[in-house]
Image (cartoon, helix red, strand yellow):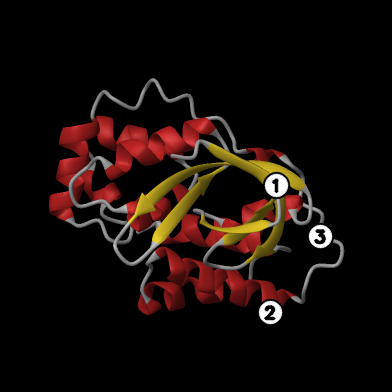
Amino acid sequence: MYEYIKGNITFISPYYIVLEAYGIGYQIAVANPFSYSPFYHKETQVYVYQVIRDDAHLLYGFATLEEKQLFLKLISVSGIGPKSALAIMALEDHGGLVYAIETEDAAYLTKFPGVGKKTAQQMILDLQGKLDELAMTPSAAEQLSQDTAGQPAANDVLAEALEALRALGYSEREVKRITKSLEQSDAATTDGYLRQGLKLLMKK
C-alpha cells in the first residue's frame, strides 16, 4: 500500500491530476484538482490511498496526512464510497462537517452528493466523537497564493469549475442553480470558482 508519492504534477483536469514520478504518470482522483494549480510542473508530495478492484486499480490523493485520515474515516461509514468522500471533503469546511456530525444535523449532511437521510444518520452514528482528534489544517495547495497570470479566459475557467462540480457528483440541476451567481462572482481562477460553487451548493 502506498503512503505518498512525490513527483511533478503534469496534468490537471476536473476529474483528476497526474503526478509523474520516476517516469511513471500516476492518475490520482482528488477532491479539488484545481487546488493543485500552484504545483503545476513543480515537485510536490501527494498522500494517496489505493483501491484495488477486479477491473481497476484506483488512487485517491490528499495534500496532507490529516485529509487522508478524514477520508479513511468517511469511507468507513456504510453507504459512503471514495467518490462520495471526496465530494464531502471538497468543501474544505471540515469544521462545519465535524459540527454537523456532533450536533446531529442530518439536514446539513444530506446536502452533499450521494448522501441521503439514511447515510447521514449512519455518519452521525459512526463518526460522532471520532473526528475531534483530526486537526484539520489548510492544505498545502490552499496555503499558497494563486498566481493568476496566464490564466485562461473567465468563461473557460468557469466551465472547468462547473465540470469539476459534476465530477464530484452534483446534478445538472444543482449546477445550473448556481451558475448565474458564479457568472457574477469576482473569481479569477478555476479553483476560485469551484470553492465558491461548493459554498453556494451548501446553502438552502
Determine whether the residue tagged by mark 3 lies in a helix, strand or loop.
loop
- On the image, numbered disc 2 is attached to which residue? 155
The residue depicted at 73 percent of the width and 63 percent of the height is 188
The local crowd at label 2, few if under 14, some if 14 to 19, many if 20 or more residues have their Cα within 10 Å, is: few
The local crowd at label 3, few if under 14, some if 14 to 19, many if 20 or more residues have their Cα within 10 Å, is: few
Q: Which residue is situated farthest in the top direction here?
A: 133
The local crowd at label 1, few if under 14, some if 14 to 19, many if 20 or more residues have their Cα within 10 Å, is: many
Depicted 172 relative to depicted 80: above or below: below
State the image quarter where residue 34 is shown: bottom right
For the N terminus, the quadrant is: top left
User: Mark 2 touching mark 3, by CB under 8 A?
Assistant: no
Q: Which residue is situated farthest in the left direction here?
A: 118
Cα distance in 3D space between marks 3 and 1: 23 Å
Q: Which mark is residue 7?
A: 1
Count the numbered circles shown: 3
Q: Is residue 83 left or right of residue 188?
A: left
The residue depicted at 34 percent of the width and 27 percent of the height is 131
- On the image, numbered disc 3 is attached to which residue? 148
Determine whether the residue tagged by mark 1 lies in a helix, strand or loop.
strand
Q: Amino acid at mark 3?
A: Thr
Q: Is residue 140 visible?
A: yes
